[in-house]
Image (cartoon, rainbow, N blue to C red):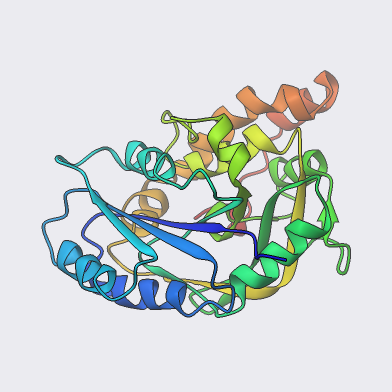
Amino acid sequence: MPLPFVSVVTPVYNGGKFLRECIESALSQTHTDLEYVILDNASTDETAEIAASYAARDDRIRVHRNERTLPIIDNWNRALTLISDESRYCKILHADDAMYPECLAKMVALAESEPTIGVVGSLRLRGDQVECGGLPIGTGSYSGKEVVRLFLRQEVFAFAPTAGMIRSDLVRSRAPAFYPTKYLHADLAGHFELLDKSDFGLVDEVLLFSRMHEDSVTTKVASKKQTILKDWLWMLQEYGPRYFAPSELARIEHSETPLTPLFQN
């Protein structure tokens, strides 16, 4: 049986500092039936040269470049429109992150085991902290609705969208704007759009390394301005009615409990 074809997608702007490690992690996957789409958002550093040098050595890499720099979420959305029509799964890999060698193989295996799974996540190492745990161990497949309910109630930081893999038909179904552009944390909203209709799969292993550094959007914007709090409140208003009964949603909206530490970055 042929392996499911996977699109790995890296939207990048001035990511040259860590891009080599990111690319090499994609090319080192034990799951080899993949394409690697890199969208350069009109970078002014060495990003274009690095991407071109790897593309010249490996024909699985396709490099695209915007004529002008797009807003970050618009760039993410354009990157997702570039995946192959043959792709069964799509894995976002940001330029300052890296996958461990068995990341795709283990995510694909779980997704293939349950056709109702639309999104697959894993534990991730962020800095020196392991994140995205808290769900019952050993289950593998979970109700997408229940995972979002736990997330919006701040009970379980069950998924980090940048660590996840999505069924490509679900990505295409929302083209050309998979991510809602009104949110800085649009990756969360993108998952909320899917998980009321599909299940969530979790590989209970660390399969991704997410780097913390001074130039990241998380550090420069999200943490300093506490944008997750604002987005969380807006998302609760928009997506809450899909996932909660009116009385339960009202209790959450009127709670004065601040965001827990896991939800602050």
* Front-lying residue, 62 or 40: 62
Q: Is residue 73 above or below residue 20?
A: above
Residue at x 19%, y 42% (from the top left corner): 69
The picture places residue 55, in percent across and down from the top left corner, at: 27, 68
Using the rendered view, name the quadrant where residue 258 is placed. Answer: top right
Q: Nearer the viewer, residue 107 or 185?
A: 107
Which residue shows up at 74% across the image and 32% down it?
A: 252
Q: Residue furthest left?
A: 44
The quadrant holding residue 193 is: top right
Q: Please name whichever residue, 263 or 120, is drawn nearer the observer in this view of the structure.
A: 120
Would you say 245 lies left or right of 154 here? right
Q: Looking at the figure, which quarter contains the N terminus?
A: bottom right
Front in this rendered view, residue 64 or 257:
64
Apparent side of residue 99 relative to residue 3 in the rendered image (left or right): left
Residue 30 showing in the rendered view: yes
* Rendered residue at 80%/28% (across/down): 244
Could you say where residue 243 lies in the image, as x and y percent from the top left?
77, 30
Q: Is residue 265 left or right of residue 203?
A: left
| Quarter of the view holding residue 100 | bottom right
x, y percent for residue 174: 54, 30
Residue 257 spot, x, y in % from top left: 68, 42
Instruction: Report whether residue 132 is seen.
Output: no
